[in-house]
Each structure stands twice: as C-alpha cells, then as structure tokens.
Image (spheres, grey):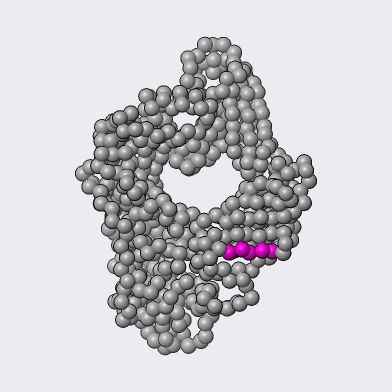
C-alpha cells in the first residue's frame, strides 16, 4: 500500500540498483550500415505489460540494410519465431556484454544455411539455436545479417539491445553513450493529475483523478493553465503525462528520469537505468496502468506502489505521498529529463482543502492482498486463483456475473461473463481462471475462454475444456466467458494456381482467422515438408525458395490451424 509523507522535512530514502559495470562507449560501433541513424523508440519506454527492452533504429522504411557486429565476440544464439523479435541474433561480446538484434529479414549466408538445415532436420518453422564460443566468431564490423520487419514489428527497423552477459541486465545504451542520437529537444509535459488516497482495512481507496492542463511559457518552462493553487486532500499523489521527441522524426519517446520536490525538498525520483527481464512487467506498477491503457504518452505515477521495485526509485520519501493540512500551502516542482540530458520542468502551488476525503470508501467488496494467495469465486461456477505477489497493491474486488453477451458470427457463447477483477487491474503473474458450464460434445475441442473488450467485442484468452469446465492460465482481467469457435482460418495464395514462378524468390499466402489467430502451419511441396515464415502483422505466410528452379510443375499443400483447433487446408500447383 502507499504510505503518507509530510511535504517538507522528511528524509529521503535512497535506493540503488544492482551494481553492473557501465558501458564503455568506445567499445561499440553503430549496428546498422547505410541508414540515416534515426530512431522510433528508446530504452525503457512504458508499455502495457513491459518496459521496452532496447532501442528501435529506423531503416528508412526499407529492409535489407547490412547489420554489423558492434564489437568482437561470437554468435551465441539464433532465433526464428512468428512473434516477438521474429528473426533475432545474439552476439556474446568479449567485453562482457551481449548484443541483441531483432526483427531481421535474414541472417548472413553461412548462418542462413545452418538455419535451413536445422529447420529441415527438425521439421520446425520456429527454432531457438545456441552455439559455443568457437562456432561462429565475429570481429567488430563483420556483417552478421540484414535488417527486416519480422516478428511483432509494425514497420522495417532494427530492435537493438545491450545486456550485461552474466546477469542479462539490460543497459540504457543511449544514456550510457553506446548510441548517441541527435537530440536537443526537451521532453514535453502534457498534463498533471492529482489523486487523493485514504486506507480502509489496509486497502488504499482513491478519489477520482483531477486533471490539470499545462502550457509552456516563452522561457521553456511549463506552468498550469490555471492561476489559482491546486486544491489537495490530506494525503495524495500526482500522476504525470509526458513524452519526448528527437530531432528528425515525428515519433514520441519515453523519458529517462522524473523528479518531484515540495518546497525545495526532493521526495520522489523515477529513473530508467536498466532492468532484468523478470522486472519488465513491473512497468504496470511504475505507470498509472488504468490511464496508460488509453494513452500514447508516458503516464508515470509519482508514488510507489507496494509491488513496484525499489530499484526504479533512487529517491523516495515514504512512497511519494504528499500530506497537506487544511489551508496549508506548498509549492511542487516536477522535472523531466530524457536520456540525452534535455530537461523540462513544471512548478505550481498547492493548498490543503478543508472538505473531507473525496473518495468513496467501500467496504462491501472482498479485500485481496499481494502478500497471500487469493481465491475469488462467483457462485459455484466461476473462480480465479491469484498467486502471492501477483497483485501490485491490496484491492477491494466486487466479483459479479454479467448477462449473457451476444454471440458474434462464428462464435458460440456458452456462459455468462464473469468479472473477478476490473480490466484496469494488472497482474505480475498469471492467474488460474476456471468457469464451469455445459458444453455440447461436438464443441468441446473448440472451447476456450474469451475476454470482452471495452467496445463489447470478444477476444481470445485461451484455455481448455475438461470435466465440465474451461480452465486458463492468464493475466487477462475484466469480463471473462466461455465460447466455442467454429470457423476455420482462411487461406488465399498470392499467386494464381499453376502460375509460372521460375523467377520468383518466394511462395506467399495470405492467412487470417476470425478469433483466436493462427497457432500452427505446415507447408508441403511435392509431399515434402518445407520451412515457412509467418508475418503476423502482415497476415502472410512465406516460403523462401531454397532450391534451384527446374521449370517443372510442383504441387503444394498448406495446412493452417487456429488456437481453437479449427483447421484449413489449401492445395494447388505452380511451375518453377
């Protein structure tokens, strides 16, 4: 839970991250050749469910730019997957760090040939290959692959990371000088919110957020658009909406550091110096998750939830709550800094309100706490089991059954919806959800849990049916229900049947699914398994021809299966 601190006079608690040697910028060269050295995302950006783990480097809207080893070392890992980083390459460097290259189009020729052999031997479209130090040595400047748009990528770019090899802790490589963008633009402060906090039975209870617009003055400093002080309660905290820009691009970026002081006394600092992957999901505690879900900006809570790790807060006075007596006046200063050292600040007065707490304490809910396992039930038919330390703070929950949703085309709704936790409640660890309902025998293999979005549409959550119930391990919160998906995926070749493809480099198909998405696929040419890459953001499956053209007729069979067990097959022929 959040604890209160007086606005002035309290001593600041100092936290330090695990000691990891800083990068030596002279060790590294730029990883992309023939590109303009512009960027689309920076390290540590707040995203629902994770911090961004690296720097996204633009490749000028093109694929195929040479990627080079940033330092001496060896190829230690090569991954091909449909999602995530797609085609990814890991270099273990002699200086004690690991460089990660994501979303590649292809690897260099010898690595690509090794990959081809492994995929055929395993008959697997996705692979995760690890190598000893003497297998694929590289020297600084060696070409190791080519930039692309594979995996969960919205456009051609390189995702690039530097990790400490022993701990796999990620470095903020811009802040530490490994990459030096052109950037003299200060962060933007977009608005400020205030939330009053009280506790009831050890559970935080909050007032609705009060929002205040800001404007930048001629000197470059920010101020509120209102002239009167902000009225605050006995205890509360601020939420900052901010973003950053860089020279030459229209993308928005995250910020490196946010500090807050009251009457000149520092009481809060958030700083993104690095993290290990087990802490990435704690982004949902650093941000104000409910606001972040609907904002493209950084939404940073200037207070520390119980489940937010200390390492992100070098300075913290009793978790960042500001206490203000009725009629008492103070001055708040908030400063934002990007990873290139540009700064912006906002100052405004506050005054303690005389009225009572503006929230609505509600003790009718069920109290759940991070420090213990929790079981929440709705009648006898639905329950959720939440692991210890999965919640970021204590909560009052109001589990309920909701009327049977309408059934969209292709789906059969088999239960009411159940709400155990609000959709704005993030979970660190997955919960176990079970909903009991009658499912006709012919639908059981296609039955899963679905979530209901804010617009009322249904989306796939997963799970399996067994013994009268559907069970899923999921971090999805909000409305959950049981559905059966009866529609198979669709397949459309991006060539005509019998086409002459002697000069083509690829065999391409368009695939889609109405609900759960493509889970697996198999392509056979002349009854022989061949590798096939899936590009989920484009909705395509692609086989790159890896054998010489013979100008003969070939047959193919593509089988695609969705995550609800529905299967589609398409057969045809081509000449090559």
> In the rendered view, would you say 209 is above or below 557?
below
Q: Is residue 471 visible?
A: yes
Residue 181 is situated, as x and y percent measured from the top left of the image, at 29, 48
Identify the image quadrant of residue 219. Answer: bottom left
Q: Which residue occupies the extreme left position in the image?
A: 26
Residue name at image x 66 percent, y 41 percent = 564
- Number of labelled discs? 0
Confirm whether the magenta stretch covers residue 377.
Answer: yes
Residue displayed at 58% across by 71% down:
367
The residue lying toward the viewer, choosing from 126 and 489, is 126
- The magenta segment is 374-378
Please identify the quadrant where the C terminus is shown.
Answer: top right
Residue found at x 36% / y 41%: 100
Give how far across and how far down residue 50 sits, in percent.
45, 53
Q: Is residue 472 above or below residue 310?
A: above
Residue 197: x, y in percent? 49, 76
Residue 159: say if magenta.
no
Task: Name above or below for residue 440 compared with residue 560.
Answer: below
Locate residue 374 relative to residue 35 in the image: left or right: right
Give the residue at x 63% y 64%. 376
Q: Using the rendered view, name the quadrant where residue 524 is placed.
A: top right
Quick check: can you spot residue 38? no
Q: Find residue 267 and report its horizontal and vertical position in percent.
A: 34, 73
Magenta: predominant secondary structure element? strand
Note whether 320 is above or below 389 in the view shown. Answer: below
């Amino acid at each position: 839970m959040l604890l209160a601190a007086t606005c002035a006079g309290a001593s600041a608690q100092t936290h330090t991250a695990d000691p990891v040697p800083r990068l030596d910028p002279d060790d590294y060269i730029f990883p992309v050749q023939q590109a303009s050295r512009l960027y689309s995302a920076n390290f540590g950006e707040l995203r629902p469910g994770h911090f961004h783990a690296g720097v996204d480097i633009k490749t000028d809207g093109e694929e195929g730019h040479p990627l080079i080893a940033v330092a001496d070392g060896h190829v230690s890992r090569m991954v091909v997957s449909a999602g995530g980083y797609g085609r990814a390459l890991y270099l273990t460097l002699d200086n004690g760090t690991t460089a990660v290259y994501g979303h590649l189009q292809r690897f260099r020729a010898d690595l690509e040939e090794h990959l081809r052999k492994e995929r055929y031997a395993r008959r697997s479209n996705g692979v995760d290959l690890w190598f000893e130090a003497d297998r694929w040595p590289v020297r600084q400047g060696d070409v190791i692959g080519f930039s692309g748009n594979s995996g969960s990528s919205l456009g051609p770019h390189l995702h690039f990371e530097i990790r400490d090899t022993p701990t796999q802790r990620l470095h903020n490589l811009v802040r530490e000088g490994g990459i030096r963008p052109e950037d003299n633009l200060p962060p933007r402060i977009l608005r400020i919110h205030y939330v009053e906090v009280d506790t009831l039975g050890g559970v935080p209870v909050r007032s609705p957020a009060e929002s205040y617009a800001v404007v930048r003055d001629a000197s470059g400093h920010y101020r509120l658009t209102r002239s009167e002080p902000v009225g605050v309660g006995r205890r509360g905290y601020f939420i900052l909406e901010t973003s950053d820009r860089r020279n030459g691009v229209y993308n928005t970026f995250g910020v490196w550091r946010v500090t807050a002081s009251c009457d000149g006394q520092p009481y809060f600092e958030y700083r993104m110096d690095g993290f290990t992957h087990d802490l990435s999901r704690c982004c949902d505690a650093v941000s104000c998750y409910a606001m972040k879900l609907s904002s493209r900006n950084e939404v940073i809570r200037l207070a520390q939830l119980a489940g937010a790790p200390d390492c992100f807060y070098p300075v913290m006075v009793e978790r960042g709550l500001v206490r203000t007596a009725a009629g008492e006046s103070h001055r708040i200063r908030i400063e934002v800094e990007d990873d290139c050292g540009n700064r912006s600040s906002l100052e405004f007065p506050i005054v303690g309100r005389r009225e009572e707490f503006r929230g609505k304490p509600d003790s009718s809910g069920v109290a759940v706490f991070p420090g213990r396992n929790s079981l929440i039930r709705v009648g006898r038919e639905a329950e959720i089991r939440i692991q210890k330390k999965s919640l970021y703070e204590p909560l009052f929950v109001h589990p309920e059954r909701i009327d049977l949703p309408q059934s969209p085309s292709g789906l059969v709704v088999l239960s009411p919806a159940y709400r155990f936790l609000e959709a704005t409640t993030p979970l660190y660890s997955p919960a176990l959800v079970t909903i009991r309902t009658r499912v006709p025998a012919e639908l059981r293999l296609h039955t899963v849990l679905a979530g209901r979005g804010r617009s009322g549409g249904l989306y796939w959550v997963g799970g399996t049916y067994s013994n009268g119930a559907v069970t899923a391990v999921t971090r999805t919160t909000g409305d959950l229900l049981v559905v059966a998906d009866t529609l198979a995926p669709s397949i459309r070749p991006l060539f005509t049947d019998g086409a002459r493809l002697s000069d083509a480099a690829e065999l391409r198909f368009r695939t889609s699914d109405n609900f759960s998405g493509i889970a697996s696929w198999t392509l056979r040419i002349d009854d022989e398994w061949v590798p096939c890459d899936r590009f989920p953001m484009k909705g395509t499956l692609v086989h790159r021809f890896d054998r010489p053209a013979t100008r003969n007729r070939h047959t193919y069979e593509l089988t695609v299966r969705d995550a609800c067990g529905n299967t589609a097959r398409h057969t045809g022929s081509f000449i090559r």
